Each structure stands twice: as structure tokens, then as C-alpha cells.
């Protein structure tokens, strides 16, 4: 007989087993728990909780995956103090480690490991009693990894219904909407998401009544859990039915289902596939087949996502498949992420909400002939607030022409002597920037209209300190030995890595300042920065490479490299004659290398 996944857990009794019963997946895993040696379990479904539960030797929280854990956390009641708290995620493939908080009692034991063949287990034991409710909430907060876990400025409560996925582990749950206006509440909500409307008194702290929303639309997908991390450009098998990937064939999407789907060309869904499952797969960038867009539209699916999901695509073509995945995941993020959901609630309440932050693009150039091209790359950005900080290195640009090229986009123009260090020029540009998020761009590379947006999206779902794209697509100008070429290199993407393309470096200005700004060097400034981030223990994430093309002309670069190095057989996936960008680049004809406005172009 197969051992129970918790057969060696050995928790001090009695043990309260608090289980998420929202979809039955975690409940199924608990069968036979009464027979686990060394465990005295009392199983309590989350939906049955109606008040504090104290007096336990240990607490075990059971959920299918990190998204469900993060959703259930706000419903966890007062649990008193105990010496052992464990979290079992039954359908999560990778263990995760809890980082203890400094105010907790000293640790006696900490473990993160697989739970047999059923999910993963995180166990923490203390030398003295710890407040179990707060430990569980911290587990839920940390489960998605480091990064932005703030509410963005809008405080949300829930009345008569569970919290939405992936938002605030400390969200207030109310029996009815009236409780939101209680004068004794020090932190009243801006918005109450409720099953039914009701009267709410104005609150003296916010000087108005909290806004009650009964029709928030489809619940968001937790982008910190369901996202493109791990997307594969290749596949081992063809399209697979969703029911074949899910435990018990019931079609519910968990982290384990997404991990299994990565090996397939796509996933076949049906008209009965639940909207949350479609959203989870879409946010993860899994190509879907058989989507019933009309039915999903009836349930509030954004038209942009429905269009992306149902677009005609040749899944046999790896590049077209990845472009399709990108369009789907971007639409899911823009319209159905927790970030988008909270922004919509903030708009309805008329309160501020910080979603994607503004970005200052730092452009240091010593080539006036490339300026018009570079300005167009910035001017075409959409889905993000972008300021340009132009650092002209050794020449005086036409400021009126810059203003005309950028239109209403905010910008600054700085000039520097041609002998100044490149690192010093970039540091001055960074210090002049208005935004807290900085992006280093190059003057001769191509950027898709969504390039900045996609970097911010990756920053959000990855929680990384530095985000960038790979130099996956490289355009090599013709020389005496060959015609011009577009090379696609086999750089992995949607992974944590040590290196990203220097023309796509996105990071917070606080991190840059902590590293002493850009190093005072004449070249290799990108390598210096990435090395400093890595030495400081920072996380670097490499998102997709479809929206960026590195240009090599053989001269004018701060770093030199033989063009043939870009064509080594071990790193080249494919080559095309001429200029052949991804469709995601949406290149303007005027910016093609043979366009009339390009150096050496025709016309």
C-alpha cells in the first residue's frame, strides 16, 4: 500500500488541519490522514470556519497550490500560539522556503521538501509558541516569491464572499457591507466587493462611504503564480486535452497542470472549461485550442483576450506559436491580472492606484545620425508611461526636433563632452530622471511598441530586481563577405538568468544608487551593472526576446565583437536573409534597415 504523503510529518498534537475546500483538490489529498502515524488531526474546511480556533499543538494548512494558499490566507482565523506550523500544497511541483520574520520566536527547525509524490511541504518549528495565524499569512505572502506585494493604494474588503485571488493576505472579510463603515475601524476600505448591495455609512477617516461593488467581473488570475516563467519554445508532444493533465481528470488548473502543459504544443479546452482555468492557462502563456470565446465573453472575458485566444495560428511553427503565446499572456495580464482588477476597482471608487510604474528611458548616444531612429523607438511605446532622458555625448541635438519627434511624451535633453566617461553620462541621465524605474536603451536597436510594457509586466510577475530581454534576434549589416542577415539565437527566455541584453536593462533607481550608479567606465557598462547586481544577491529575469532586435553594423559600438561570433553554430537557431523581425516587433517601414531614413538606406 502506498504511504500517505505526510507519513513522516510528526507534528505535535493535537493538529488543526485547515483545508481549502474551494474546488475539492486539497480535500481529496487528505484521504487517509487519520491513519498517519504521529499525527492527531482535526480537519476543518475553510468554508466551515466561523471564529477563532485556539488550543492546538500544531497547525497544518492544506491547499492545492500557491494561488489557492494566497487566496485562503485572509480567511484564516485567530489560531492562538503553537510551536509547529506546516503548509502542504498538494498540486505544486517545486518546494519553496519560508524566510522567518525577525519578530518571530527563534526557529528550531525549517524544512521545504516534496511530499512524496503529492505536492510539496514547508514545515517550520519554533522554540516557543508563535502566533499561527500570522505565520500562515506570511507563508501565503512569501509563497509567490519576492517582489511587489503591496495593494497599490486601494484598500479592498469583502462582504459575504471570499477574497479574490492573489491580492492581500490581510484583506478584511465582513459578514455584510454595513461593517465597512463602522466608526471604530481604523483602516476602512476604499472598496467593498460584495455579493449583494447594502447601505454603508460614511467613514470619518476617508470622509465618504466605501464604494460597494457587486459586479466586479471575472475574478482575477494571480499573476505572481500563473505567469510565463518556464515557457518553452519547443515541445515534446502535441496538443493535449486539459483533462489528461489535471489530477482526476476534472480539468482544474493548478501549478502542476501548467508545469505539465509546458511539454506540449498546446492544450485542448472545451466549452465547459471554467473561466478561472482558461485565465490561469492564458496568463501562463499556454497555447489553447478549442476556446469558446462567445461563452467566455458572456462571463466577462475581455474582448482583447478573446481575440487573442481565438486568433488563427500555426502551432507547428515555433515562432508563430511563441508570438501567439505572447499576445495571449499580455492580454490576460492587461485585463484579468490582480493588478488590472484592483485598478478597475480603484477607478470605480475614484481613488488613486499605482499599477505599472512610470519609466524613464535613458538614451546615451554619440551618433547624431541615429537620433531620429532612436526617438521613433521611444515615441511608439504604448501601455506604459515613458519619459525619455536623452544624453547627447559629444554633440548638441536639435531640441525642437526632439520635441516634435516625441510629441506629448515627457523628455529631458542633456549634453556632455565627447571625452566624458560613458558610465558618467548614464549616471547623470539616471539622476536627472523623473521616474523611480529606469530603462537603459541603445540608439540603434529596434524596440517593439510593447517593449517597455512587457518589461514592466515581467518585473511584476517575476519579482526580479533587474529585468531585460535576450539579444535573441540580431541584425547583421552586409559586409564584403556576405549579404545582410537576421540571426535568431537560441537564448533561453522567460527564465531567471545572469545576463540580459544591455539595451533592455530595467531596474529601480534605488537599486542603481545602492550599486554606486553606473560605473565610471568607457565601455562594458552593462556588464559592470549586472555583475554588481549579482554580487549583491539581486535577481535577474530574462523575459521574451520577440520585441527587441540588436543591430550590428561593425562600428560605432562601445563593445566590439566579430560579427561571426553571432553566427556560431552552437548558438544559432536559424538565419534569414535580409531583415526578418518577429511579428511582435510591428516594425514601421520607415525603420527598416533599407528604409529611406536609415543610414545607407535607399530612396
Image (spheres, helix red, strand yellow):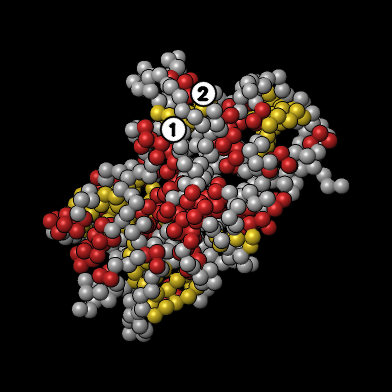
- Kindly identify which residue carries mark 2: 176
Whichever of labels 1 and 2 marks the residue nearer the N terminus, that label is 2
| Residue 35 visible in the shown view | yes
Q: In the image, is residue 486 above or below residue 107? A: below
Residue drawn 76% across the image and 43% down it? 5
Residue drawn 34% across the image and 51% down it? 383
* Badge 2 element: loop
Residue 481 location (% of width, % of height): 36, 85
Q: In the image, is residue 46 above or below residue 585? A: above
- How would you rate the neighbour count of disc 2 (Cα within 10 Å): few for under 14, some for 14-19, many for 20 or more? some
Left or right: 49 in relation to 550: right
* Badge 1 element: strand
Q: Marks 1 and 2, Cα distance to the nearest angstrom?
A: 12 Å
Residue 205 location (% of width, % of height): 37, 19
- How would you rate the neighbour count of disc 1 (Cα within 10 Å): few for under 14, some for 14-19, many for 20 or more? many
Residue closest to the eye, 554 or 324:
324
Residue 395 location (% of width, % of height): 16, 60
Residue closest to the eye, 49 or 359:
49
Residue 236 location (% of width, % of height): 63, 67
Residue drawn 42% across the image and 53% down it? 303
Q: In the image, is residue 265 above or below residue 224? A: below
Amino acid at each position: 500500500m502506498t504511504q500517505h504523503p505526510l507519513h513522516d510529518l510528526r507534528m505535535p498534537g493535537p493538529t488543526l488541519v485547515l483545508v481549502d475546500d474551494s474546488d475539492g483538490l486539497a480535500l481529496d489529498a487528505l484521504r487517509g490522514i487519520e491513519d498517519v502515524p504521529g499525527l492527531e488531526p482535526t480537519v476543518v474546511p475553510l468554508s466551515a470556519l466561523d471564529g477563532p480556533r485556539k488550543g492546538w499543538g500544531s497547525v497544518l494548512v492544506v491547499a492545492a497550490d500557491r494561488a489557492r494558499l494566497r487566496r485562503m490566507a485572509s480567511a484564516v482565523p485567530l489560531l492562538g500560539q503553537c510551536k509547529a506550523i506546516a503548509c502542504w500544497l498538494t498540486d505544486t511541483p517545486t518546494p519553496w522556503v519560508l524566510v522567518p520574520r525577525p519578530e518571530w520566536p527563534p526557529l528550531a527547525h525549517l524544512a521545504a521538501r516534496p511530499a512524496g509524490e503529492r505536492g510539496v511541504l514547508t514545515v517550520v518549528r519554533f522554540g516557543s509558541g508563535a502566533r499561527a495565524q500570522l505565520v500562515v499569512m506570511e507563508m501565503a505572502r512569501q509563497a509567490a516569491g519576492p517582489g511587489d506585494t503591496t495593494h497599490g493604494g486601494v484598500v479592498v474588503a469583502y462582504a459575504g464572499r471570499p477574497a479574490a485571488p492573489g491580492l492581500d493576505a490581510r484583506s478584511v472579510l465582513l459578514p455584510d457591507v454595513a461593517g465597512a463603515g463602522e466608526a471604530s475601524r481604523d483602516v476602512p476600505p476604499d472598496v467593498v466587493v460584495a455579493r449583494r448591495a447594502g447601505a454603508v455609512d460614511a467613514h470619518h477617516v476617508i470622509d465618504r462611504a466605501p464604494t460597494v461593488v457587486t459586479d466586479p467581473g471575472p475574478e482575477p488570475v494571480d499573476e505572481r503564480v500563473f505567469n510565463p516563467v518556464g515557457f518553452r519554445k519547443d515541445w515534446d508532444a502535441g496538443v493535449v486535452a486539459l483533462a489528461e493533465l489535471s489530477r482526476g481528470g476534472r480539468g482544474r488548473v493548478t501549478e502542476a497542470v501548467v508545469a505539465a502543459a509546458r511539454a506540449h504544443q498546446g492544450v485542448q479546452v472545451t466549452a465547459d472549461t471554467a473561466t478561472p482555468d482558461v485565465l490561469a492557462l492564458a496568463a501562463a502563456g499556454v497555447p489553447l485550442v478549442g476556446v469558446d470565446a462567445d461563452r467566455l465573453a458572456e462571463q466577462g472575458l475581455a474582448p482583447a483576450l478573446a481575440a487573442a485566444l481565438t486568433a488563427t495560428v500555426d502551432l507547428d511553427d515555433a515562432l508563430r506559436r511563441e508570438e501567439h503565446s505572447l499576445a495571449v499572456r499580455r492580454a490576460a495580464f492587461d485585463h484579468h491580472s490582480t493588478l488590472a482588477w484592483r485598478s478597475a476597482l480603484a477607478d470605480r471608487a475614484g481613488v488613486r492606484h499605482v499599477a505599472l510604474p512610470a519609466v524613464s528611458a535613458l538614451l546615451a548616444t554619440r551618433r547624431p545620425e541615429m537620433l531620429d531612429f532612436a526617438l521613433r523607438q521611444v515615441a511608439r511605446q504604448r501601455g506604459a508611461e515613458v519619459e525619455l532622458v536623452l544624453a547627447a555625448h559629444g554633440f548638441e541635438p536639435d531640441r525642437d526636433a526632439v520635441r516634435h519627434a516625441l510629441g506629448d511624451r515627457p523628455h529631458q535633453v542633456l549634453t556632455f563632452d565627447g571625452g566624458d566617461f560613458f558610465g558618467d553620462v548614464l549616471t547623470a541621465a539616471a539622476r536627472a530622471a523623473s521616474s523611480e524605474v529606469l530603462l537603459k536603451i541603445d540608439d540603434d536597436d529596434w524596440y517593439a511598441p510593447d517593449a517597455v510594457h512587457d518589461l514592466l509586466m515581467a518585473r511584476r510577475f517575476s519579482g526580479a530586481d533587474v529585468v531585460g530581454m535576450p539579444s535573441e534576434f540580431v541584425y547583421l549589416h552586409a559586409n564584403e563577405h556576405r549579404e545582410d542577415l537576421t540571426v535568431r539565437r537560441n537564448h533561453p527566455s522567460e527564465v531567471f538568468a545572469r545576463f540580459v541584453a544591455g539595451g533592455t536593462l530595467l531596474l529601480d533607481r534605488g537599486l542603481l544608487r545602492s550599486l554606486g550608479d553606473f560605473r565610471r567606465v568607457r565601455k562594458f557598462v552593462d556588464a559592470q551593472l549586472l555583475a554588481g547586481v549579482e554580487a549583491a544577491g539581486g535577481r535577474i529575469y530574462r523575459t521574451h526576446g520577440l520585441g527587441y532586435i540588436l543591430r550590428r553594423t561593425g562600428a560605432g559600438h562601445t563593445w566590439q565583437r566579430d560579427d561571426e561570433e553571432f553566427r556560431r553554430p552552437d548558438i544559432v537557431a536559424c538565419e534569414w536573409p535580409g531583415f526578418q523581425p518577429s511579428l511582435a516587433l510591428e516594425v514601421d517601414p520607415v525603420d527598416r534597415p533599407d528604409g529611406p531614413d536609415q543610414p545607407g538606406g535607399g530612396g
